[in-house]
Image: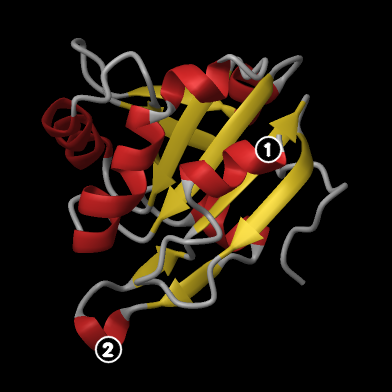
């Protein structure tokens, strides 16, 4: 059963791209004692993710943080090098934390993964947004189609928090 509002996030270790190479970051390091907006995309640089979903969070980062949010993070089933390149290319540096879920372990633990093998993508994360407080899901918006970024958009989340 997919994660629900009121559930605690599963323990996971992500990889984050840094100048010194990829470094691990655990769910505790990211979410403990913090209010975090987390959104997931099926893949870095894919059309909807790159041109629609991420730009909304970058453009509205100050508005989101003004609502008491400590961190805005994006997670994708891509390696940390791709996520680092996407961060650099998107102008999101310092506004959004880019988390690599390279093996889809986090997406699978949330039961929010899907099989994109038919189009050469392998296992991917469903597109969603959530508000997490101290590791507990307070809001959750999951898209019904991977190519949509409506219910999981920055604008929608802003109206909910």
Q: Point out which mark residue 160 bears.
A: none
- What is the CA distance from the residue labelled 2 to the residue labelled 1? 31 Å
Secondary structure category for the residue under label 1? strand
Confirm whether residue 112 shows in the render: yes
Q: Nearer the viewer, residue 108 or 36?
A: 36
Quadrant where the N terminus is found in the figure: bottom right
Return the x and y of residue 18 as percentages of the image width and height: 25, 16
Confirm whether residue 12 shows in the render: no
Q: Which residue is under mark 2?
A: 118
Q: For the view shown, which residue lies furthest in the right direction? A: 6
Q: Residue at x 43, y 38 (%)?
A: 74
In the figure, residue 132 lies in which quadrant? top right
Q: Point out which mark residue 131 bears.
A: 1
On screen, 81 above or below 125?
Answer: above
Quadrant where the C terminus is found in the figure: top right
Return the x and y of residue 58 as percentages of the image width and height: 34, 30
Q: Residue at x 22, y 19 (%)?
A: 21
Secondary structure category for the residue under label 2? helix
Confirm or deny contact between disc 2 and disc 1 (CB under 8 A). no
Q: Earlier in the sequence, mark 2 or mark 1?
A: 2
In the figure, residue 99 lies in which quadrant? top left
């Amino acid at each position: 059963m997919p994660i629900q509002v009121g559930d605690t996030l599963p323990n996971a270790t992500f990889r984050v791209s840094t100048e010194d190479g990829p470094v691990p970051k655990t769910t505790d390091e990211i979410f403990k004692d913090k209010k975090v907006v987390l959104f997931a995309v099926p893949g870095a640089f894919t059309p909807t993710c790159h041109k629609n979903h991420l730009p909304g969070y970058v453009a509205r980062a100050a508005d989101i943080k003004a609502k008491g949010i400590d961190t805005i993070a994006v997670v994708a089933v891509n390696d940390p090098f791709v996520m680092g390149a996407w961060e650099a290319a998107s102008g999101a540096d310092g506004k959004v934390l880019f988390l690599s879920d390279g093996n889809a372990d986090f997406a699978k633990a949330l039961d929010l993964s899907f099989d994109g093998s038919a189009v050469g993508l392998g296992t991917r994360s469903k597109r969603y947004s959530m508000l997490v407080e101290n590791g507990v899901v307070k809001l959750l918006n999951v898209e019904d189609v991977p190519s949509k970024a409506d219910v999981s958009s920055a604008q929608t989340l802003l109206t909910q928090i």
